[in-house]
Image: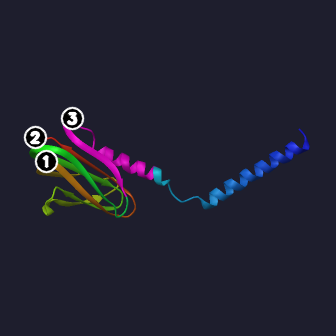
Amino acid sequence: MNRSSVSLYGCAAAVLLAGAAWYTVNAPPGPSPRLELEGLRQAVAAVLPPADDLVVGDTFELAEGATRQARAEEMPFAVYEVLLACAGEGRVRAQLGRSVNAVRMIECGRPPVPVQVRRGLSGDVVLNLTAETRGTVVFGWQLFRPER
């Protein structure tokens, strides 16, 4: 091996070591945010498992202070069971339908605890959500056929 090759490899090794040292000092503490959210998503999926009588369901991220609307369209009138769950820190205000009496505060937890609501619903069923959280949470909901 000649002298220029040794110099080149030595410089490459020095740059690699400097980069590793910089990352060690400046890396954010704790797990990556993506891994954290994936863990929250898995926790919600564990308490809201798939079922044969599921009409509609969804799981999504809600950022701090975010609002979102979820819906099921053209539902025939019946008494439906709705399961709601939130993983993370804080709570989510959930209003099912137009009635002010249909508001539930869903506590976000680790692990999440599902909340069951039974309501007479028809037409377009709208679930309005407002996140009162610390950071991003994962929220899931499921609407089941009557006579479950």
Whole-percent x, y for residue 55 in the image: 20, 40
Q: Are marks 1 and 2 in contact (CB under 8 Å)?
A: no
Farthest residue to the right: give it.
Answer: 3
Q: Name the residue under label 3.
A: 52
Q: Nearer the viewer, mark 1 or mark 2?
A: 1
- Residue at the location (26% across, 44% down)? 57
- Residue at the location (10% across, 40% down)? 147
* SS state under label 1: strand
Whole-percent x, y for residue 80 in the image: 13, 46
Q: Which mark is residue 131?
A: none
- Name the image quarter holding residue 102: bottom left
Q: Which mark is residue 147?
A: 2
In depth, the one of 110 and 27 nearer the eye is: 27
Q: Which of marks 1 and 3 is nearer the N terminus?
A: 3
Q: How far apart are marks 1 and 2 (CA)?
A: 18 Å
- Identify the magenta region: 35-62
Q: Distance between the residues labelled 1 and 3?
A: 22 Å
